[in-house]
Amino acid sequence: MRVLTTFLWYLLLICGATLMLLPFAWMILTSLQPATTTLTMPTNWLPRTLQWVNYQHVWQLAPFTQYWLNSLLVTTTTTLGQLFSSLLAAFAFTHLQFYGRRFLFGLLVALMLVPGELLLIPNFVTIAQLHWVNTYAALIIPWLASVFMVVTLHQAFQSQPRSLYYAAHIDGASDWQYLWHILVPTNRPIITAVAVLQVIASWNAFMWPLIMTNSDQFRTLPVGLMAFTSEQGTNYPLLMAASVCVILPLLILYVCLQKYLMLGITQSRWKGSTQ
């Protein structure tokens, strides 16, 4: 019975993984097909000839290099900015005593209940009044802080023994040194996990860059995918080839940091269950 149960579990996992991978397989195979055979029925899963030239056309028909550099710049700066501001805010809410600390933290938690779509119009009006439309500032500055990251890091810092903070002060360490030399190294898996989640969210962001940019000079990769859709129709092979180019950096990042990501998620759940 134990062997049968294990076999059924593995069979279920394999079926689930296969269903999850089918869209990605269709995307890759479609990117290697000619446009004339893309929408044929039944679906042609295995193209007779592989059109590798589709990937070359992607970089020629649209300023894809500029889109890629813009996404890299926006993703890097927003991730580093959120990490820095969130680490400082989480440390302040955890270890510093100031008036209204509990109220302010409760307000931050309440802000997580507000849908992001509800803030699009107020944020657009603010950016327009600052004359930041179609600039890097509009894509970066509003996202230099993250309530989710502050709350997650606050939970991680709160699980550290309070005696460790007092012992560090007795040894002459300042709050700044305690944060960067003790808290950050001991919570590296959780910090890595939230950083990876932010990279994915920033790299895949579509609505905000679409609203804030009106030229190819500042558009990011998700918005740049619209270049392969026109009034005449959609060139699906080129669109899928461009999508592969967008997903590939995230896939490489996930493979490299998978251990830290899973460790951070499990560690966060364990700490939350022990509090």
Image (cartoon, rainbow, N blue to C red):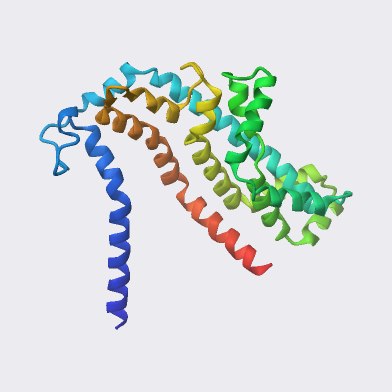
Residue at figure coordinates x 75%, y 62% from the top left: 161
Identify the residue at the far right of this view.
99
- Left or right of 102 on screen, residue 60: left
Q: Nearer the viewer, residue 205 or 2?
A: 205
Residue at figure coordinates x 67%, y 45% from the top left: 147
User: Image height check: is 32 above or below 190?
Assistant: above
Point out the image quarter for the C terminus: bottom right
Q: Nearer the viewer, residue 42 or 141?
A: 42
- Residue 120, percent from left and from top: 60, 34
Identify the residue at the far bottom of this view.
1
- Residue 95, percent from left and from top: 80, 52
Point out the image quarter for the N terminus: bottom left
Identify the image quadrant of residue 83.
Answer: top right
Number of residue marks: 0
Residue at figure coordinates x 55%, y 41% from the top left: 198
- Residue 260, percent from left and from top: 51, 51
- Left or right of 69 on screen, residue 123: right
Identify the image quadrant of residue 268.
Answer: bottom right
User: Image height check: is 186 above or below 88?
Assistant: below
User: Image height check: is 77 above or below 186?
Assistant: above
- Residue 5, percent from left and from top: 31, 77
- Left or right of 57 on screen, residue 247: right
